[in-house]
Amino acid sequence: MLKTDHPQGGIPIVPFQLTSSSEADTNLWGQRLADHAIAGDVFLLYGDIGAGKSVFARAFIKKFLNDNDVEVPSPTYTLVQTYERGEVEIWHADLYRLTSPAELDALSLHEAFGSALCLVEWPEMIRSMPEIKGATEIWFEQVEQMADQRKLHIRPGNLRITEAVRSIQAGFA
Ligand SMILES: Nc1ncnc2c1ncn2[C@@H]1O[C@H](COP(=O)(O)OP(=O)(O)O)[C@@H](O)[C@H]1O
Ligand SMILES: [Mg+2]
């Protein structure tokens, strides 16, 4: 996790904090944000193992592809899985097992940023790359003693996503 002085252990204070009460809620957030996503958007997904990053990414990608049957495996071992919708490439990465900057270079993520729609789990290692300026960041936080509850902390990377999060949040109320 990021080292910050947030009282809840490494999560910075960001504009939106919402509660997901179930996996279905997290799916809805993924689906609804996918409706507002365009090529070039980058979503950095932070959180411990089991926090819900892959659940979110899977729902997002299925919705963006408009295909509920497509397999969206966790890229834990492959590091990157790619998809296509017409001209738009989608990159789903999981950098947990990344060990060196050289390995990062070999993934060619820097080429995807800016053109592909990118969802990156465990993005700590790339956070300072200039290419990801303007990324939307989401921290998934597990809630103690509430097995199916998560807090999502969202820092939108641009005004379009800010408006999107606002309207999605209003729809949940
Ligand atoms: N509110 C919730 N949102 C997302 N996942 C949840 C939620 N409640 C329970 N879960 C469970 O937590 C796990 C999240 O797994 P996963 O998305 O693979 O985590 P990560 O990719 O962050 O390691 C799944 O088993 C899912 O069923
Ligand atoms: Mg995962």
Image (cartoon, rainbow, N blue to C red):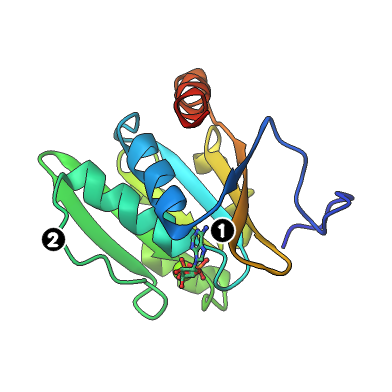
Circles 2 and 1: CB atoms closer than 8 Å: no
Secondary structure state at the residue bearing disc 2: loop
Residue shown at the point (50%, 23%) measured from the top left: 170
Could you say which quadrant of the image residue 149 lies in?
A: bottom right
Residue 165 shows up from this direction: yes
Q: For label 2, count other residues whose C-alpha is less than 10 Å away and answer few (under 14), some (14-19) or many (20+).
A: few
Ligand 2 within 8 Å of the CB at mark 1: no
**Which numbered marker is on residue 170?**
none
Of residues 89 and 51, which is closer to you in this image?
A: 51
Could you say which quadrant of the image residue 37 lies in?
A: top left
Residue shown at the point (13%, 61%) measured from the top left: 69
Residue shown at the point (46%, 21%) measured from the top left: 167
**Residue 166 located left or right of residue 75:** right
Residue 109 shows up from this direction: no
Q: Is residue 28 above or below residue 95?
A: above
Q: Is residue 75 above or below residue 87?
A: below
**Which numbered marker is on residue 123?**
1
Of residues 80 and 106, which is closer to you in this image?
A: 80
Residue shown at the point (51%, 18%) measured from the top left: 159
The three-letter code of the residue at mark 2 reads Asp
Point out the frontmost of discs 2 and 1: 2
The three-letter code of the residue at mark 1 reads Pro
Disc 2 from disc 1: Cα separation: 27 Å
Q: For label 1, count other residues whose C-alpha is less than 10 Å away and answer few (under 14), some (14-19) or many (20+).
A: many
Q: Is residue 56 above or below residue 168?
A: below
Residue linked to disc 2: 69
Quarter of the picture containing the N terminus is bottom right
Earlier residue among tags 2 and 1: 2
Q: Position of residue 30 (x, y in %)?
A: 39, 46
**Residue 94 located left or right of residue 40:** right
Q: Position of residue 151 (x, y in %)?
A: 64, 50
